[in-house]
């Protein structure tokens, strides 16, 4: 495919005569045949490596997983409702400092 980088400067460019359009790109017919040389468009193909295929498989499995550990959420809710949930303030403060330090 020809691309016009000269923005219409030079002889023969941006001509509406012949098969080339004003952007100097040879158009294709709907059937994939190139109008200038009569050859059909070649089929493009992509081959993925085994690593990419493995990553795609893992990604699909991860998408099936819930966003949160619902069992743990239920345990915490139950502990809060029963007054059994205790907060470790030192651990909480350390986590907040670590988070703030990473910003």
Image (cartoon, rainbow, N blue to C red):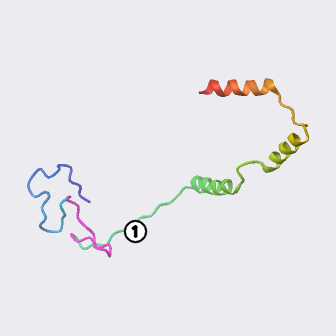
Q: Which residue is mark 1?
A: 43
- Magenta: main secondary structure equals loop
Residue 75: x and y in percent read 86, 45
Locate residue 66 relative to residue 81 in the image: left or right: left
**5 to the left or right of 88:** left
Q: Is residue 27 magenta?
A: yes
Q: Which residues are magenta?
A: 23-36
Q: Give the SS element for disc 1.
A: loop
State left or right for residue 4 relative to residue 97.
left
- Where in the figure is residue 21, as x and y percent of width and height? 19, 63
The residue at the point 91 percent across, 37 percent down is: 84
Of 68 and 51, nearer the camera is 68
Q: How many marks?
A: 1
Question: How far across and down, in percent of the image, does residue 70 sit?
Answer: 79, 50
* Residue 18 is a magenta residue: no
Q: Quadrant of residue 19?
A: bottom left
Q: Residue at x 20, y 53 (%)?
A: 4
């Amino acid at each position: 495919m020809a691309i016009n980088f000269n923005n219409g400067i030079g002889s023969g460019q941006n001509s509406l005569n012949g098969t080339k359009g004003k952007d100097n790109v040879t158009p294709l017919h709907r059937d994939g045949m190139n109008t200038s040389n009569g050859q059909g468009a070649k089929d493009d193909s992509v081959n993925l490596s085994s690593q990419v295929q493995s990553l795609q498989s893992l990604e699909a499995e991860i998408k099936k997983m819930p966003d949160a550990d619902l069992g743990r959420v239920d345990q915490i809710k139950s502990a809060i409702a029963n007054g059994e949930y205790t907060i470790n303030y030192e651990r909480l403060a350390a986590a907040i400092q670590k988070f703030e330090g990473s910003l």
